[in-house]
Structure formats: C-alpha cells, structure tokens
Image (spheres, rainbow, N blue to C red):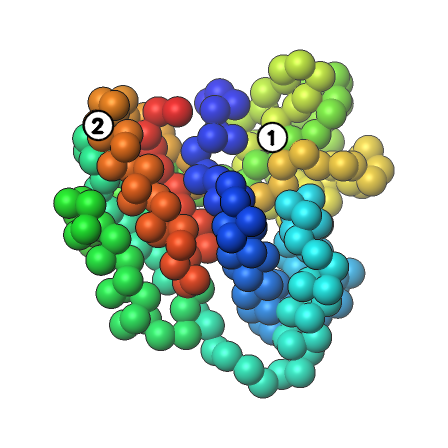
Amino acid sequence: MGRAYQNRKVSMAKTSDAKARVYSKYAREIYVTGKSGGTDPEGNLALRGLIERAKKDQVPTHVIDKAIEKARGGGGEDFAVARYEGFGPGGCMIIVDCLTDNANRTIGDVRACFTKTKCKLGTPGSVSHLFDHSAILVFSSDDEEAVLDALMMADVDVTDLEHEDGKISVFVPNTEHYKARQALQDAFGDIDFEVDEVQFLPQTTAELSADDELVLEKLLDMLNYLDDVQNVYCNAAS
C-alpha cells in the first residue's frame, strides 16, 4: 500500500488563518462526537481519539474544552454528515467530507468550488468505490510479528501491515478502528500513535500534468476554505 497515504489527505494547516480553520473544524467534530456518543472520553473512544489527534495538531486546550462543554449542554446546532464525490483536473478523483447544519448551503458551496475550477461534482458513489475506507495506526516498533499476533488474537481484520524505519503502520477497515487500537494498547501499553485516524485511501493514483496540479491546488484550497468541509481526499499522485 505504501506510506504515501500520509500525503493523500490534504493538509490544511499552512498559514495562521488556515490553522484557525483547522481549530474550528476540530471544535465542530468534537462537539458532534461528544453530543452523539457522550462527553466522557473514557466512555467515548471516538471522542478520546479525536481529542488526542487535536492535541497532536496543536489545537489549544481551551478550544477542545469549549467544544466538549457545548456538547454537554445538550442544545446547540444539529450537524449532519455529508459526503460529496467528484472529478478534478486530469481525471483525478476527489472525496469531500463535511459536517453541515444546512445541506443545501453546503452542496451549493462545494459545487461552486468544482464549477469555478472547471471540475465536475459527481453522484454519490461515483468515486468512493475506488477508495478503501481504512483506519490507519502508525507507531514506533520493530516487532512486526508481535503486533500482528496481538491483532489476530483480538480477531481484528488486518488488511495490511508495514514495517519501515522503526515504525509499524497498521491498516484495518474503518469499522475496526477502535477495536484495533484497544488491542494494541492492551498488548503494548500506552502507545504514542504517530497516526491514528480514518482515511479514504485510493486504490490507484492519477498522474497530473503541471497545469493540472495548479488547478487541483486551487480547487483544494477553495474546498478547505469552506467551514463545512472537514476533510478532502484525492487520488492524485503526490
């Protein structure tokens, strides 16, 4: 599968303005996760993993705490998950994951990004079947056999495991994310995961021309600027 997956999820934190947007996106996701599954990280594994990831991305503690407190209040916005799929320059494929409180506004905003860059928004399922919805766990270890044994003992469906430069990368179906995470922590203690998240990994990659790369960069910048957009995935070769 290759470790290039780390480049496939589009990075957003390039400027101070972009960092503020990243904080906002984390706050929204923490709020939604806490509201739906409970605000105690010990009982809500999704929330715990999200908080740990936010801290790794240097999201300020007060932003995290405010989002949790907001979720604990019970009221507030009613966000829904929305996923849009489309085709970028050079025939590359794009998935846009959103959290929205107004689906009509969000799809209009996303469509405008595609239209302004002369790209095409597709129908649901038009490209996602060519991506693997996978959980990825990366951590420092040299004992590949012990890691695989721990996962197999916990009946985790491992789709791939890589060992490179003193780090092990575990790939499992997105539905097995927390099961795999717990199995590894039970076997090896409090692991400091370098990567701990769910991504869409493309089954194939598209080579783009220099001109197409510029168009793609513009499209991705426009999408990431939208408040409702949480993550963007693309199969363009990095």
Determine the residue positioned at 55% across, 65% down: 28
Residue 211, disc: 2
Measured from the top left, where is residue 102 in percent x and y?
35, 74
- In terms of depth relative to the viewer, which is nearer, 47 or 148? 47
Whether residue 86 sits left or right of residue 139 in the image: it is left
Q: Which residue lies most toward the front here?
A: 16
- Which residue is farthest right? 189
Q: Residue at x 51, y 41 (%)?
A: 14
Above/below status of 211 relative to 163: below
Q: Mark 1 — residue? A: 170
Residue at 52%, 23% (x, y): give it.
Answer: 3
Amino acid on which the number 1 mark rests in the picture: Val
At mark 1, the secondary structure is: strand
Judge whether residue 22 can be spotted in this image: no
- Tell me if mark 1 has few (under 14), some (14-19) or many (20+) residues whose alpha carbon lies within 10 angstroms of its own: many
Comes first in the chain, label 2 or label 1: 1
- Taking the image as shown, residue 25 lies to the left or right of residue 66, namely left
- As drawn, is 10 to the left or to the right of 169? left
Q: Give the vertical position of 228 relative to 13 (above or below).
A: below
The amino acid type found where label 2 is placed reads Asp
Tell me the quarter of the image containing the C terminus: top left
Mark drawn on residue 223: none
